Image: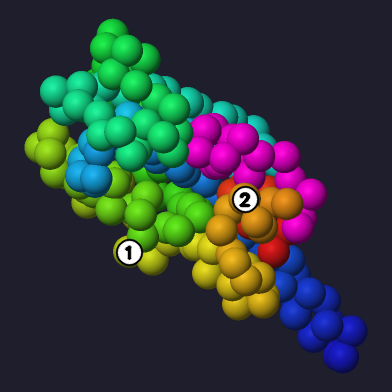
Amino acid sequence: MKDEENTVSMKIQNERDNQYMNFTAIDFETATGHRHSACAVAIVTVQDGRIVDEYYSLIQPPKNEYWYQNIRVHGITAEHTKNMPPFSNIYPEIRERLSSKIIVAHNESFDRSVLNAAMKHYGLDYSELNLSPRWECTCKIYRRKGYNPARLDCCCQRMGIELQHHQALSDARACALLYLKR
């Protein structure tokens, strides 16, 4: 009887662990201090603990407006996005990759607020994504582990993860790898 209980317990634990090996990591860059001004998005899909899909797109922010401070962070300029689609045009790709998934981000409150604000700006219904109101946050996870500072670049350096900081695809990929290694 004890062996059966152990087997059931192990099966439940394996199912719980596997749930967290299937997730989607996201990263946005913004053109201005306004959350709806997404100028780049990257989404990395992980299934069974392996990266199986990566999506990246530049986005033309509203009026293709940029603030110098933001350009200094990520290097994306109005020239880079002048012929890129607005958020509303790439939203179907985003929806396909995020809908009903476990979402992970580094400093999740920023990325969640960018997604929400951009959707609101373009008249899109955030609730149709069917996302949990609580996303997983690798910044918080690593801070609880004692990492100080827990910035993405610092966590990646300590964990041996390659990173081109503030390049959205590199950031999303690094976030996914941090989550897998937590």
**Magenta highlight range:** 158-174
Residue 145 is inside the magenta segment: no
Residue 112 got which mark? none
Residue 44 appears left or right of 31 = right
Residue positioned 37% across, 31% down in the render = 71
Q: Mark 1 or mark 2, which is nearer the start of the sequence?
A: 1
Residue 44 image position (x, y, % from top left): 55, 37
Q: Look at mark 2 in the image and give the residue it sits on.
A: 153
What residue would you read off at disc 1?
A: 133
Closer to the camera in the image, 23 or 155: 155
Q: Nearer the viewer, residue 145 or 73?
A: 73
Image position of 158 (left or right of 80): right
Compared with residue 33, is residue 95 higher up or lower down, i.e. above or below?
above
Going by the numbered disc 2, the residue's amino acid type is: Asp
Q: CA distance from mark 2 to mark 1?
A: 26 Å
Residue at point 75%, 80% (across, down): 9
Residue 79 spot, x, y in % from top left: 32, 12
Residue drawn 40% across the image and 40% down it? 28
